[in-house]
Structures are given as structure tokens and as C-alpha cells.
Image (cartoon, rainbow, N blue to C red):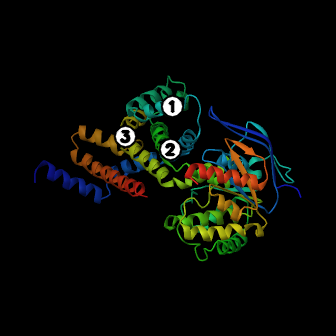
Amino acid sequence: MGYWGDSLLTAFELILGFDREVRMAVWTSVYTSSCSIVIAALFGVPFGLWLGLKRFRGRQLLIALLNTLMAMPTVVVGLLLFGLLSRQGPLGPLGLLFTPLAMIAGQTVLATPIVANLVLAAVTGADRRIINTALTLGASRLQAAIQLLREIRFGVMAAVIAGFGRVIAEVGVAMMLGGNIRNSTRTMTTAIALETSKGEFAFGLALGIILLSVALIVNLFLNVLQQR
Amino acid sequence: MQPVISLKNIRVAQGENFSLSVDSLALQPQRIYALTGPNGSGKSTLLRVMALLISPQEGSIEFAGSDSNHLARQRQRVTLVEQSPYLFKGSVADNLNYGLKLRGIDSKERNSRIQSTLTIVGLERFEQRQAKELSSGEVQRVALARALVLKPELLLLDEPTANIDSNSMQAYEALLSGLSEYGVTVVFSTHDPSQSRRLGEEVLRIENGHLINGSRRELEESALNERNRVYGA
């Protein structure tokens, strides 16, 4: 059947046979990405909302900074956090380096600007009358802001899903802060890099297919939400 | 009788050139006030000041018997319906429920108020209709119902008939003229002198940001002259 054909066959056998190595890598990816996106949403959604509603000196600078952080290479995030978490770093005594917690921290740093930026875009694009309408019906400023979030809920969900798509597919943070330790911090992306370099193309392909499927599902969700 | 709202020495600066100036204004309970004035004269700004959406740089606003300085609580006594009202996503009932929930009213009371208010505005059985499916006339009436259901002491309407067709306008005017029966004081802004004559029990006139003092007749003449100036006699 040839190299590709044999590899694809083996890849599907690994997926359908629920191979333990594949399962562990998928679980670690989904677990760390889900935790990091929840934390990123807790920070990013209120921050994007605040930045969208407030007018103050330095706002444009803050937005430019947010855009820069959004485009920051994953290995740079990994590098900076590595400096903080390594034995010689200020947070070294916590012993977090090469643990799932370190990966979650790194992926949170990666996802928060994305979520904040996309929520900011949704707030900026929202109908300007929403806040005043809520206020005239007796809402406080905070209640009016919450009502605005309800009105742009699909934009907020799209922001969170886009952030999830980014972190589940990244490799720099997972590699540098997780260390690609088998059954502990090995994710789909780091496993693909490692196994392929070892000549286990079929294994890498199996994980690649799963990763692509996740990306496809995330994008389908995004499309549905953006049409609302 | 104690006024529903009293404004004293109000000054609002917006940008460099425009300001609103009201030396004294006291609105009596259960009266319908027509607020007239040319485009850009400050009608909407005055309504927003009374709705506590704009804080004046100078002056004081007092509600009858008010013992609270809490802005959101004060704001719950007055409701403004904008010229192009925004309806929240969801059903008509969702929209009417919003302000009632903010006031902590239980669901039984909410449902009863919603049904009776929708009947007042002629939108019985509209509860489950989606906001996005409504015509512009229906949107205006739902926005009015959303304000009325809260039983405000002061209801402010910013050019309520500007964006609706003539049939809807007649129905809306009939509705407006009966509103004081529900114990509410109404201020509506309008460009149309005949509308202010038809519906306004009192007339307020604003020009270049200044609230004009004068008899009803003088204010109506001023409105008519302005209309003739703009559209020709």
C-alpha cells in the first residue's frame, strides 16, 4: 500500500483501538486546554468588556499591547514562563516546571489576550443603545454591562472557542513548560513532534487526525456562532 | 401639589459649543408635557438629564419625596423611551421582564403586569413574539410597554412617533393621550406643533439649549413660527 497508505491504516487502528498512548496525549491536551481557557475567560472576558466600555488616556496603547500579546509566538511565552518557573527563577521553589499546571499557566497567558481582544471587538461592534436602554430600565452600570454581555453572548462564545482552538493546537508552551513527559505532560502536539522524529509516523498521523478533527469541530462552532 | 421632578440651575456642556441651560423646571404629577424645539436645540439632552443618564455640570435634580442619593435607585423612578428604541434579543416578555426582575418583583406579579400592560398598548398575545420579528410601530409600542410595566412616576418619550407610519401614529397618539390615567407624568418631545397641541396638556419649549419661559400660547406660536421658517408657511 505504500508508506502513506500503511501509515494511515495504522493511524486509524490506533485511533479506533483506543491506544493508551494516544488516549493519554488526547486527554492531556483537552484537560490542560480546557483548564487554561476557563481561566483565560475569567480574566479575558471582563477585561475585554471593560476596555470596550471605558474611555481613558492610554486606551489605544493598551489595545495595541493586547494586539501584540495576541500575536506573541508560543515559544516566547514558554521561554518567559520557563524563566519564572525554572529552579533558578523566582517561582522555582513551587516546583511547577514540567507539570500540567505549568502548561495551564502558559496556555492561559497565551489565550487571555485572544479572548480579551475578541470580546473587545464584540463590545465595540455592539449596538450603542444597549447600555443606555438597560440604564433607563433601572439597571446599575454593572447590571447594564452584564446585559451587554448577554446581548453579545455569541461573540463572547466565539472568543472563548477561538482561544481554545489556539491553545489546543500550540506546541511551544507545552514543550517548554511541560517537557513532553510520557503519561503526564505529553500532549497531542508534543507527541506528534517527538514520535515523528523517532520515525513513528503513523502514531504522529493518528494524533494529527484527531487534532485536525478538533480544529474542524471548533471552526464549525465558530461559523455557527458568527452567523447568529 | 408636589412636583414629580424639579430641576434647578441645570447647566450641561457637551463638547465646546453646546450647552443646556435650565433655570427652573418643575413637572406636576399625572400631566402630559409636550417638549418642542428645533433640531439640535437640546430636547434629547434635557430628556437624558431628567432620565439621569447625563450628569449636569451644575444644578440639582430632585424627585418628589426622594431620600436616596443612590443613582440606580433614583433612575428606577423614571424611564426614557428613545426615538429608535432598542429591544433586547429574545421575546417581548423577556424585554418586559428585564426591568421588573431588576426591581425584584416575583414571577406571578411580573406575568400579571406584563399581560395587563400589553393589553394597554394593544399587543395582547405578543408575549412570545421575538423582538426581531416586530415592525417599527410594534417595536415602539413594546418599548412603551417595557417602560409602562415598571409603573414609573415619570415617563420620557423622545420623539415617539418620528419613525412610525401614519396608521400606527394615530394608535400611538390615542394611547399617549390616555397615559396620565395610569398615574404617570409624561414628557414627549416632538417637532410637530399640531401634535403638541393635540396631546400636550402643558407645553415646554427649548431653543439653543435654553428652556424658554412663557405662556402656552406664546410657546405654541414660537413652535409654529419655527415650523413655518423651516418648511415654509
Amino acid beneath label 3: Glu
Q: Who's the residue at 39% across and 53% down the image? A: A222
Q: Which mark is residue B226?
A: none
- The residue to which callout 3 is attached is A170
* Residue furthest left in the image: A1
Give the vertical position of B200 relative to A83 (above or below).
below
Residue that numbered label 1 is attached to: A60
* Distance CA(mark 1)–CA(mark 2): 13 Å
Does residue B100 appear in the picture of this structure? no
Task: Say whether disc 1 or disc 2 marks the residue closer to the N-terminus.
Answer: 1
Q: Locate the N terminus of chain B and report the quarter of the image it occupies.
A: bottom right
Q: 10 Å neighbourhood of mark 3: few (<14), some, or many (≥20)?
A: many
The nearer-to-camera label among 3 and 1 is 1
Pinpoint the chain carrying mark 1.
A
Q: Residue shown at 66%/71% (left/top)?
A: B174
Residue designated by label 2: A124
Residue closest to the eye, A53 or B86: B86
Where residue B103 sits: x, y (%)?
73, 60
Judged from this view, the residue extending furthest toward the front is: B233
